[in-house]
Image (cartoon, coloured by chain):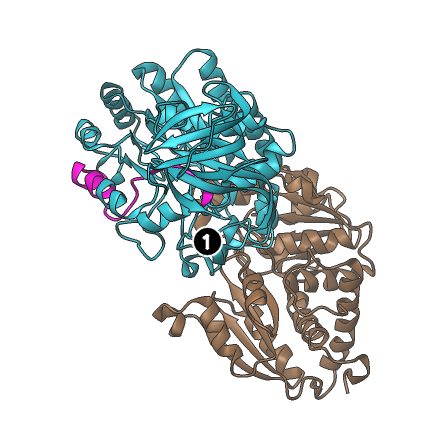
Chain colours: A brown, B cyan
Amino acid sequence: MTGRKHLLGLEELTAKDIESILDTARSFKEVLERPIPKVPTLRGKTVANLFFEPSTRTRISFELAEKRLSADTVSFSASGSSVSKGESLKDTARNIEAMQIDMIVIRHQASGAPHFLARSLNCSVINAGDGMHEHPTQGLLDIFTIREYKKRVEGLRVVIVGDIAHSRVARSNIWGLSKLGAKVVVCGPWTLMPLEVERLGVEVTSSIEDALKGADVVNVLRIQLERQEGSLFPTLREYARCFGITRERLSVAKDDVLVMHPGPMNRGVEIAQDVADGPFSVILEQVSNGVAVRMAVLYLLSGLEAGDKLE
Amino acid sequence: MSEDGKLLLRSGRVIDPSSGLDARMDVLISGDKIELLAERIEVNAGMRVLELEGKLVVPGLVDMHVHLREPGREDEETIGSGGAAAARGGFTSIACMANTQPPIDTSGMVRYVLETAARTSPVKVFSVAAATVGLGGERMAEIMDLRDAGAVAVSDDGNFVGNSEVARRVMEYTRMAGLPFISHCEDPYLGKGGVMNEGYWSTTLGLKGIPAASEAAAVAREIVLAELTLARVHIAHVSTRAAVDLIRQAKKRGLSVTAEATPHHLVLSDKAVSGYDTSTKMNPPLRSEEDREAVVEGLRDGTIDVIASDHAPHCEEEKDVEFDEAAFGVIGLETTVGVVMTFLVSKGLLSLSQAIAALTLAPASVLGIKAGKMASGLTADITVIDPQLEWTVDPRSFASRSRNTPFKGWTLVGKAIVTVVDGKIVRQA
């Protein structure tokens, strides 16, 4: 991460960058396990959280990460703001930056919105999810969780199941995992598979059985219910029957398979109840790790020297 | 201008694809006409002489596809500013599309455009009128009336006439009126809501894609209807390999189908979108490299007749936003010659004569206007190009009111330096 000002996606990071974030996150995870889980590292820095799209866990996770690092934070949501009065994204962000902000965390429904801000502003920009493009901190926390359990990423068979076309989580996972040497398999109905996805270096299949065979990790994506109305799949019932992750289906995966989900889950649709709460599930662990990973990202982008760490 | 109104273009390389002329010659202009083309013309007293050694002297360029935004969006462009941009780009005739506010769908609107142009534009402006009322795609416009008011073609441009029955009737009417029907081919359902080409780059960037098939499906329908109605159909801004193939087959079968390509589709692919630069957002979108190559090949082999800029001015506020939100379209009047010379002619993909034909004779012939040729007795619409002139695209210096070009900062070689309309120099660099 040396020399980087923004985190816009995992596509532009090197394997070394990713590993450096994950290593830093491990240190921060230890901080979070202390009786007083807080360090003064970002004291005096101000972070603005701009959430133009509804979000619960990502937003709280970022806010917590900022507070655990002693940063000052301000938060913003699009409803009831100047945006609802017709102000442009650029003007909104520039006004906020003019209040001496060091970093902006942005969640936006338009792919590329963080890139647009990074070009328009002087402060650091962290992508907290942009349209169908990337959700880099989710990708990082997924990889962090995998690495914690499996002790490695290289050579693992990681299956991403569901709506690949519209998923920013899938893209960040694909870039991050591939760079660290995992074998990534994407699986879903062809209507939810983006064109030429195989050029991202993944194996593509619409057979859930083939995909799960020998899988080390299954990352189950949320099915957005409105896709059904756009006739991208016929019914939720049929989707669950063809692609839902059940215990029975998991029997062809490795014995120690990890089941992940970025949330929020549609239980009984993309993931069966007993899988979501079952022994293979690390879904809540992912959420916990999210705070440490976001602390690492904030810290590494703040421009602080290594010696300033964690005191 | 001298007393007797004579202008001598001396020692340029004169290229006129209509007659196959390509020679070092003098051109004498008298009043608004070309008086003489000859190897050597004596200079008389009072004659204004331009020494053009090493320069290209060609028929005035014709851009058959521009958007002038007047009336309705004069902040983006006016007939006057668009005309000035055309003059700077070397165009002596341009045809403007009907999607103004209100649209050009009545004879009164056609007359408004032509009269405003006569007052404010340094170059000739021809009006393309709407095919359907309000560009709505449901009720045919008064096509005979539009023609009588001066329209040279009909088109709903940005709006594909999705109702095939209406499209058929429009074509029958344009045939009767003797006008070409210009079609922006895009299936209204495939790729709805898309903002770029569907493919590897849309997958990577997470942007909603418009598949190449949306163009091909629409082109196929137009060809089928052209065969049914015997209308003259012109396919606007071809961007895909599949469309080029369909047009090639249609031409082989003798149908009256012509086509155009834009400089940006000939030079850029969808890879240019990475980084979310909104000056690469256009409709049809920049396609894959394979598509781009097929469009160039189509131009080389004559499947595509015309190079047109699809000059689509947008103000900064409409482009300096998130990619999803940005307006579609780029300007092109002032960069077309440079882009064509630099990336097609200099690279040997098109001969100079082919390139000039695609910018003169071919569009004039599609529109049926008196332009695109150079011979004694014809109107003196002439463009002089310096093929060696190296320049950097700086949109701030443009005459257009808009700045939305994907070629900003590019170095191009070749530029129009003199534009003559009706015997008068309207622009000299």
Q: Is residue B20 above or below residue A207?
A: above
Q: Residue B23: x, y in percent?
A: 55, 24
Instruction: Identify which residue, B40 or A252, lies in the foreground.
Output: B40
Query: Viewed as shown, does residue B147 lie left or right of B406?
Result: left
Q: Is residue B13 above or below residue B390?
A: above
Picture quarter containing residue B275?
bottom right
Q: How many marks?
A: 1
* Pointer 1 chain: B
**In the image, farthest residue toward the front:** B45
Query: Viewed as shown, does residue A127 lie left or right of A232?
Result: right
How crowded pointer 1 is (Cα within 10 Å; few <14, some 14-19, many 20+) is rated as some
| Residue where numbered disc 1 is placed | B398
Q: What kind of element bears circle 1?
A: loop
Looking at the rendered image, the quarter that the N terminus of chain B falls into is top left
Q: Residue A17: x, y in percent?
A: 77, 64
Q: Residue at x 41, y 47 (%)?
A: B85
Q: Is residue A7 magenta?
A: no
Q: Residue at x 31, y 19 (%)?
A: B231
Picture quarter containing residue B159?
top left
Using the rendered image of the protein, determine whether residue A28 is visible from the camera's viewpoint: yes
Q: Residue B124: x, y in percent?
A: 32, 38
Identify which amino acid the numbered label 1 is placed on: Phe
Q: Residue at x 39, y 55 (%)?
A: B401
Q: Residue at x 22, y 38 (%)?
A: B110
Using the rendered image of the protein, determine whether residue B287 is visible from the camera's viewpoint: no
Picture quarter containing residue B371?
top left
Q: Residue B175: x, y in percent?
A: 27, 19
Q: Which residues are magenta?
A: B88-113
Instruction: Identify which residue, B411 or A9, lies in the foreground.
Output: B411
Instruction: Identify which residue, B66 or A73, lies in the foreground.
Output: B66
Query: Viewed as shown, does residue B255 lie left or right of A174?
Result: left
Q: Is residue B360 above or below residue A270?
A: above
